[in-house]
Image: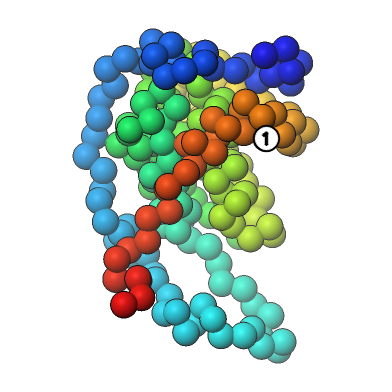
Amino acid sequence: SSLAQIQGLPLPHPGPPAMAEDNPNPVVYEAGGGAVVGLKHRLLSELLSEDRDEDKEFDDVTLLEVFESLRYLSDPEHPNLSLEQLKVVQSGHVWVDGLRVHVKFTPTVPTCSVATLIGLTIKAKLQRSLPRRYKIDVEIFPGTHNQEDQVNKQLNDKERVAAALENPALRNLINNGIAGTDRPDVSLLLA
Protein backbone atom coordinates (compact mmCIF):
# COMPACT_ATOMS: atom_id res chain seq x y z
CA SER A 1 0.00 0.00 0.00
CA SER A 2 2.80 2.45 0.87
CA LEU A 3 4.63 1.58 -2.39
CA ALA A 4 1.50 2.40 -4.39
CA GLN A 5 1.07 5.69 -2.54
CA ILE A 6 4.71 6.62 -3.28
CA GLN A 7 4.07 5.87 -6.93
CA GLY A 8 0.92 7.98 -6.81
CA LEU A 9 -1.29 5.05 -7.80
CA PRO A 10 -4.28 4.23 -5.60
CA LEU A 11 -4.58 0.57 -4.74
CA PRO A 12 -8.14 -0.73 -4.79
CA HIS A 13 -9.55 -2.28 -1.66
CA PRO A 14 -8.61 -5.97 -1.35
CA GLY A 15 -11.22 -8.45 -2.48
CA PRO A 16 -14.21 -8.08 -4.77
CA PRO A 17 -16.87 -7.23 -2.15
CA ALA A 18 -15.15 -4.01 -1.05
CA MET A 19 -14.30 -3.06 -4.64
CA ALA A 20 -17.91 -3.29 -5.77
CA GLU A 21 -19.03 -0.42 -3.53
CA ASP A 22 -18.36 2.27 -6.19
CA ASN A 23 -21.00 0.92 -8.54
CA PRO A 24 -22.75 -2.17 -7.12
CA ASN A 25 -25.37 -2.30 -9.92
CA PRO A 26 -23.76 -1.15 -13.17
CA VAL A 27 -25.71 -0.84 -16.39
CA VAL A 28 -24.80 -3.85 -18.52
CA TYR A 29 -25.01 -3.46 -22.29
CA GLU A 30 -25.20 -6.21 -24.84
CA ALA A 31 -21.72 -6.87 -26.18
CA GLY A 32 -21.17 -7.08 -29.92
CA GLY A 33 -20.66 -10.83 -29.69
CA GLY A 34 -18.51 -12.71 -32.14
CA ALA A 35 -15.84 -11.16 -34.30
CA VAL A 36 -15.76 -7.43 -34.91
CA VAL A 37 -17.23 -6.63 -38.34
CA GLY A 38 -14.49 -5.64 -40.76
CA LEU A 39 -11.72 -7.39 -38.84
CA LYS A 40 -9.43 -9.08 -41.34
CA HIS A 41 -8.30 -12.50 -40.21
CA ARG A 42 -5.12 -13.81 -41.78
CA LEU A 43 -4.61 -17.33 -42.99
CA LEU A 44 -2.27 -19.53 -40.95
CA SER A 45 0.01 -19.85 -43.98
CA GLU A 46 0.34 -16.04 -44.10
CA LEU A 47 1.22 -15.89 -40.42
CA LEU A 48 3.83 -18.64 -40.70
CA SER A 49 5.50 -17.47 -43.91
CA GLU A 50 8.93 -15.93 -43.55
CA ASP A 51 9.36 -12.22 -44.02
CA ARG A 52 11.37 -11.34 -47.08
CA ASP A 53 14.28 -8.97 -46.51
CA GLU A 54 13.31 -6.77 -49.45
CA ASP A 55 9.76 -6.53 -48.08
CA LYS A 56 10.50 -4.57 -44.88
CA GLU A 57 7.08 -2.94 -44.82
CA PHE A 58 5.02 -3.89 -41.79
CA ASP A 59 1.29 -4.48 -41.64
CA ASP A 60 -0.46 -1.63 -39.90
CA VAL A 61 -2.52 -2.42 -36.83
CA THR A 62 -6.14 -1.38 -37.28
CA LEU A 63 -8.49 0.12 -34.73
CA LEU A 64 -10.64 -2.99 -35.05
CA GLU A 65 -7.69 -5.21 -34.10
CA VAL A 66 -6.96 -2.99 -31.11
CA PHE A 67 -10.60 -3.00 -30.00
CA GLU A 68 -10.80 -6.78 -30.45
CA SER A 69 -7.86 -7.20 -28.06
CA LEU A 70 -9.53 -4.97 -25.42
CA ARG A 71 -13.22 -5.81 -25.56
CA TYR A 72 -13.10 -8.87 -23.27
CA LEU A 73 -10.92 -7.36 -20.52
CA SER A 74 -12.56 -7.90 -17.13
CA ASP A 75 -13.77 -5.03 -15.01
CA PRO A 76 -11.93 -4.99 -11.63
CA GLU A 77 -15.15 -4.38 -9.66
CA HIS A 78 -17.22 -6.86 -11.66
CA PRO A 79 -14.88 -9.61 -12.93
CA ASN A 80 -17.75 -11.49 -14.58
CA LEU A 81 -18.40 -8.49 -16.88
CA SER A 82 -16.23 -7.26 -19.74
CA LEU A 83 -15.21 -3.68 -20.33
CA GLU A 84 -17.24 -3.81 -23.55
CA GLN A 85 -20.40 -4.90 -21.68
CA LEU A 86 -20.02 -1.90 -19.35
CA LYS A 87 -19.18 0.45 -22.27
CA VAL A 88 -15.88 1.28 -20.59
CA VAL A 89 -14.22 0.56 -23.94
CA GLN A 90 -15.95 1.24 -27.25
CA SER A 91 -14.68 0.88 -30.81
CA GLY A 92 -15.45 4.55 -31.50
CA HIS A 93 -13.00 5.58 -28.78
CA VAL A 94 -10.05 3.69 -30.26
CA TRP A 95 -7.96 4.92 -33.16
CA VAL A 96 -4.59 4.30 -34.77
CA ASP A 97 -2.51 7.13 -36.18
CA GLY A 98 0.62 5.75 -37.82
CA LEU A 99 2.62 4.09 -35.04
CA ARG A 100 0.50 5.59 -32.28
CA VAL A 101 -2.49 3.82 -30.72
CA HIS A 102 -5.02 5.93 -28.80
CA VAL A 103 -7.64 4.54 -26.42
CA LYS A 104 -10.07 6.64 -24.41
CA PHE A 105 -12.05 4.71 -21.82
CA THR A 106 -15.15 5.67 -19.83
CA PRO A 107 -15.41 4.63 -16.16
CA THR A 108 -18.90 3.46 -15.19
CA VAL A 109 -19.25 6.24 -12.60
CA PRO A 110 -17.47 9.62 -12.25
CA THR A 111 -16.11 8.58 -8.83
CA CYS A 112 -14.70 5.21 -9.95
CA SER A 113 -11.85 4.33 -7.59
CA VAL A 114 -10.34 1.79 -9.99
CA ALA A 115 -10.02 4.08 -13.04
CA THR A 116 -6.22 4.00 -12.85
CA LEU A 117 -6.28 0.20 -12.58
CA ILE A 118 -8.55 -0.03 -15.65
CA GLY A 119 -6.21 2.26 -17.59
CA LEU A 120 -3.17 0.22 -16.53
CA THR A 121 -4.92 -3.00 -17.55
CA ILE A 122 -5.69 -1.56 -21.00
CA LYS A 123 -2.13 -0.29 -21.37
CA ALA A 124 -0.59 -3.60 -20.21
CA LYS A 125 -2.78 -5.62 -22.59
CA LEU A 126 -1.76 -3.46 -25.55
CA GLN A 127 1.92 -3.51 -24.56
CA ARG A 128 1.77 -7.31 -24.51
CA SER A 129 -0.25 -7.58 -27.73
CA LEU A 130 1.20 -4.98 -30.09
CA PRO A 131 4.64 -4.81 -31.68
CA ARG A 132 7.02 -2.63 -29.67
CA ARG A 133 7.20 -0.02 -32.41
CA TYR A 134 3.73 1.27 -31.39
CA LYS A 135 3.33 4.08 -28.85
CA ILE A 136 0.27 3.53 -26.68
CA ASP A 137 -1.81 6.41 -25.28
CA VAL A 138 -4.54 5.49 -22.80
CA GLU A 139 -6.72 8.20 -21.26
CA ILE A 140 -10.10 8.72 -19.65
CA PHE A 141 -12.74 10.01 -22.05
CA PRO A 142 -13.07 13.75 -21.36
CA GLY A 143 -15.66 14.71 -18.76
CA THR A 144 -16.40 11.20 -17.48
CA HIS A 145 -14.37 11.11 -14.24
CA ASN A 146 -13.91 13.48 -11.30
CA GLN A 147 -10.12 12.95 -11.24
CA GLU A 148 -9.61 12.72 -14.99
CA ASP A 149 -6.50 14.96 -15.08
CA GLN A 150 -4.72 13.11 -12.25
CA VAL A 151 -5.47 9.66 -13.67
CA ASN A 152 -4.40 10.70 -17.19
CA LYS A 153 -1.18 12.15 -15.80
CA GLN A 154 -0.44 8.85 -14.02
CA LEU A 155 -1.21 6.77 -17.11
CA ASN A 156 1.07 8.90 -19.29
CA ASP A 157 4.02 8.88 -16.87
CA LYS A 158 6.38 6.10 -18.05
CA GLU A 159 8.13 5.75 -14.69
CA ARG A 160 4.88 5.47 -12.73
CA VAL A 161 3.45 2.94 -15.18
CA ALA A 162 6.66 0.85 -15.11
CA ALA A 163 6.74 0.92 -11.30
CA ALA A 164 3.05 -0.01 -11.11
CA LEU A 165 3.55 -2.95 -13.46
CA GLU A 166 6.38 -4.18 -11.21
CA ASN A 167 4.22 -3.94 -8.06
CA PRO A 168 3.14 -7.55 -7.29
CA ALA A 169 -0.32 -6.59 -5.98
CA LEU A 170 -1.13 -4.37 -8.97
CA ARG A 171 0.41 -6.84 -11.43
CA ASN A 172 -1.82 -9.59 -9.99
CA LEU A 173 -4.95 -7.43 -10.42
CA ILE A 174 -3.91 -6.50 -13.98
CA ASN A 175 -3.15 -10.12 -14.89
CA ASN A 176 -6.57 -11.17 -13.54
CA GLY A 177 -8.21 -8.54 -15.76
CA ILE A 178 -6.32 -9.80 -18.82
CA ALA A 179 -6.51 -13.57 -18.20
CA GLY A 180 -8.65 -15.41 -20.73
CA THR A 181 -9.41 -12.35 -22.84
CA ASP A 182 -8.00 -13.62 -26.13
CA ARG A 183 -11.01 -15.19 -27.81
CA PRO A 184 -10.22 -16.10 -31.40
CA ASP A 185 -12.96 -16.44 -33.97
CA VAL A 186 -13.87 -20.15 -34.18
CA SER A 187 -13.39 -20.07 -37.94
CA LEU A 188 -9.66 -19.57 -37.29
CA LEU A 189 -9.23 -22.69 -35.18
CA LEU A 190 -7.42 -25.62 -36.76
CA ALA A 191 -9.49 -28.72 -37.31
94 in relation to 23, above or below:
below
Q: Residues within 10 Å of mark 1 (few under 14, many from 20)?
A: some
**Where residue 183 sits: x, y (%)?**
37, 55
Disc 1 element? helix
Relative side of 3 to 129, left or right: right
Q: Nearer the viewer, residue 162 or 142?
A: 162
Q: Please name the amino acid that badge 1 sits on.
A: Leu
Q: Nearer the viewer, residue 40 or 166?
A: 166
Relative side of 126 to 40, left or right: right
Q: Quadrant of residue 184?
A: bottom left
Residue lying at 32% horizontally and 57% vertically, measured from the top left: 36
Residue lying at 42% horizontally and 47% vertically, measured from the top left: 180
Q: Nearer the viewer, residue 58 or 92?
A: 58
Residue lying at 62% horizontally and 26% vertically, measured from the top left: 169
Relative side of 5 to 38, left or right: right
Q: Nearer the viewer, residue 126 or 182?
A: 182
Residue 109 in sight here: yes
**Where residue 120 sits: x, y (%)?**
58, 34
The colouring scheme, among rainbow, by chain, secondary structure or one colour, is rainbow
99 in relation to 119, above or below:
below
Q: Quadrant of residue 160?
A: top right
The residue pinned by badge 1 equals 165
**Where residue 161 sits: x, y (%)?**
69, 33
